[in-house]
Amino acid sequence: MTTSWTVLRVLRDRNARLFLTSVVVSGFGTSSLWLASGVWVKDLTGSNGLAALCMLALWAPVLAGPALGTLADGFRRTSLLITVDLGLAALLLTLFAVDSAGRLWLLFAVLFGYGAAGVVHDAAESALVTATVDPALRGDFNGLRMTANEGMKLVAPLTGAGLYAAFGGAAVACLDALTFVLAGGLCALLRVREERPARSGGGRWRQTTEGVRHLWGHPGLRPLVRAGGTTMLLAALSSTTVYAVVERLGHSPAYAGVLYAVQGAGSVAVGLVSGPALRRLGGRRFAAAGIALTAAAVAARAAPSDPVALVSAAAVGLGLPCVLIAALTAVQRETPGPLLGRVTATAQTVMFAPNVIGLAVGAGLVELSGPGLLLPLYGLALLLTAAALAAQRTDSASRTAARSPSDANPA
């Protein structure tokens, strides 16, 4: 099956088409706000440190993913998505009150709430995919979601920055609120029959640990998610060298934007081919190949050459999402519906929480040593991660259970 035909099959499905449109719309607003919020804080305080805290406020709730994911399993997913979208729209409108440094606490509180709601939203969204998308097309759908998200990151931050420069931060918040209202409306149009979730026994702690136990006890999911977390940690470490790389190339710091744009273009491209690649290679080999490509690109970035820097940025964009797409698709395929919200949120915590650690540690390491030493070491660690995942073996029964019908017959 060709890539173009598979994409058309996904887009011809009404629910999948509405779902993807919702992702594009809400992703545009989110990407517009994350850049504008830092600029907003910088303008009001002049502090680079406080501006950087905006991203921390957005990322911090992912640490509570296993607990937040239980909410996605306690309600009908469509209703929950609509409620979260409209709730975020209302929350964002409170940012009209931020007009001085003394009220920045409100901005940080909103960003923290935004991040927590995002964890619940992503878990419910992933769980709803299993009810709306044919199992044979979930890899393609998840790849297209990646393409949509990365595509928004190429254009939305510039839009947000321009809107901020013209009308201020409240205007960007208003734009983001509008995108959530539109996304909620699109979710309301989905034709999905969902049963009322059964109330599981035990308290909230027991419900949370059920998701953790399923993820960590599954022989197919554990290595994929663990490799994803290691990869994201090393990718975050390597990303802290970007300004040092730019300096070695003799460019101004703004040149980092060019490298990020090229990397984003690579991520858009891999989303279009991930479905066929998953069917041909299987999740484990697809993820390992992506990590190995990322390893080579990270190590090559140590060379003080503009063409190498651009090619390596594109290669990172192509390779890095592979393990995330493979892990998410495997979670959707191998997790019972009543647990899917919790398991998805737990997997996201394992894979994305290392970003915070990597950014903090990497910022210190790059002050002690240059990219010429650090990047080859990060590349070697990524290569070892890919090799370990590729060498992973499960028993034949687990391999059979982990394969979808499309995996068994790539044609």
Image: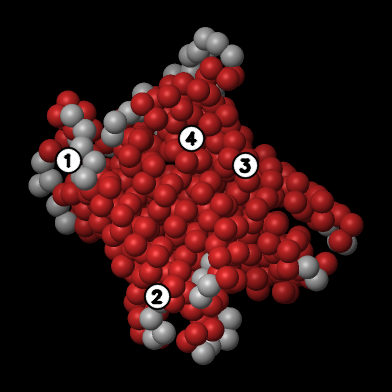
Which residue corresponds to mark 1?
Answer: 407
Helix, strand or loop at label 4? It is: helix
User: On the image, which quarter does residue 318 sit in?
Assistant: bottom left
Inspect the image, locate mark 4, and give the three-letter code of the amino acid beneath it. Thr
Seen as rendered, the residue at the extreme top is 201
Q: Is residue 149 above or below residue 397?
A: below
Q: Indicate which disc, 4 or 1, sits on the residue closer to the N terminus.
A: 4
Q: Is residue 402 above or below residue 205?
A: below
Cα separation between marks 1 and 3: 35 Å
Which label lies toward us, 4 or 1? Answer: 4
Viewer-side residue, 14 vs 128: 128
Inspect the image, locate mark 1, and give the three-letter code of the amino acid beneath it. Asp
Which residue corresponds to mark 2?
Answer: 301
Inspect the image, locate mark 3, and give the three-letter code of the amino acid beneath it. Pro
Q: Indicate which disc, 3 or 2, sits on the residue closer to the N terminus.
A: 3
In percent of width and height, residue 264 lies at 43, 67
Inspect the image, locate mark 2, and give the three-letter code of the amino acid beneath it. Arg
Cα separation between marks 1 and 2: 35 Å
Cα separation between marks 3 and 4: 12 Å
Q: Is residue 285 above or below residue 84?
A: below
In percent of width and height, residue 325 lies at 35, 48
Q: Residues within 10 Å of mark 3 (few under 14, many from 20)?
A: many
Which residue corresponds to mark 4?
Answer: 346
Query: Mark number for residue 61?
Result: 3
Viewer-side residue, 299 vs 48: 299
